[in-house]
Image (cartoon, grey):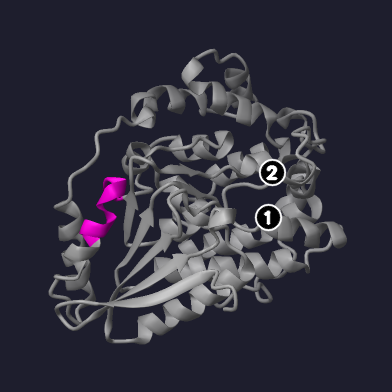
Amino acid sequence: MSQQKVIFQTLGTASGKLIGVATLNVEAALNALDLDMVRALTGQLQAWHNDSNIAMVLLDGAGDKALCAGGDVRALYNASKENPGSTETLAKTFFEEEYRLDCLIHNFGKPILVWGDGIVMGGGLGLMAGASHRVATERSRIAMPEVTIGLYPDVGGSYFLSRMPGKLGMFLGLTAWQMNGADAFFVGTANFFLGSNDKEPLMDALAEVPWSDDEAANSAALSAVLESRPQPEQASVLRKYEDEINALCEGSVADIMARFEALDNPDFARARGALLAGSPLSVQLIWRQAQLDKAMSLEDCFRWELGVSVNCCALGDFVEGVRALLIDKDRNPSWQFAHATEVSDEAIAKLLTAPWSAEAHPLADL
């Protein structure tokens, strides 16, 4: 790629096997994903998957601020604004290819280590969630903040949020809560917790691993190295308040909204503010997403999400949400509904109805 938005390299090891390294390289944009980057990652991951010399893959971000702050929503905004009401825009292409990439990571087979240091939000969490080895650090800020721009936690959120303890997945979606590393480790977003300054020593250790052609053995070897590294000292706020969060998010949308409106715990002030200021349409979608059958396959979750995501761009609050937060930056969105309890069943039904039949679905072949 001409601007090297993603840098690919291979590192040699004592075993003779190689480690594939993919580095998101748009530091000024907090390594946000655009379509070119999605395509570059997909192509290179497929090549590494088929290369018997590659034992494992590392995915990280340039700089010390972010792995990836999400997708390039400005481009999606422009395309959606130029084609109001249409589901056949850049949004459809971007989401389809992004979800294919996320699904590839989930089903990769070879171990993938994602270094989730700094900001990991939205589409960045989509990259991290499917990896076999997901590292958070004491500097991690991990969130699904889509409620603030008229979307909902996509990129597989329908799958991985539902597998978190209790109501924590719904809470994260409703409130755009920024998890620290200990939070991420507690809910399973990360399955390893390391110090941010441990990356170079870790890479040195990985170079000495006796990698083989056995994917399971390589995965176990990588786990052993990660487990041998010291963990930072950091408390999980989600663990501390797990019971309170479960109680807050119990029941109907009306119940949940009433509890948050009455909430006066200062530790939840930011979460409360994000929910109450967020898109009422998004709140309803996130609640319904949390009611999906937990037995849904990963692939069915992505298929469900693609329909909802393109509908949010064409019919929902997405364009107005991005305008208010990122374009005009007035932080005063004019949502279609004033309150989550006022959202009509008709509006929700439109967002939940995929624009394609099951047979013609763009992700039918997943």
Seen at 78% across and 35% down, the residue is 330
Location of the N terminus (image quadrant) = bottom right
| Residue under label 1 | 73
Q: Which residues are magenta?
A: 191-202
The answer to whether 307 appears left or right of 12 in the picture is right
Give, as a three-letter code, the residue at label 1.
Answer: Val
Q: Quadrant of residue 115?
A: bottom left
| Residue under label 2 | 149
Tell me residue 275's x, y (percent): 62, 30
Seen at 62% across and 65% down, the residue is 34
Element at label 2: helix
Element at label 1: helix
Q: Quadrant of residue 93?
A: bottom right
- CA distance for labels 2 and 1: 9 Å
Indicate whether 366 appears above or below 243.
below
Indicate whether 325 appears above or below 24.
above
The answer to whether 83 appears left or right of 6 in the picture is right
Q: Say whether residue 193 is visible.
A: no
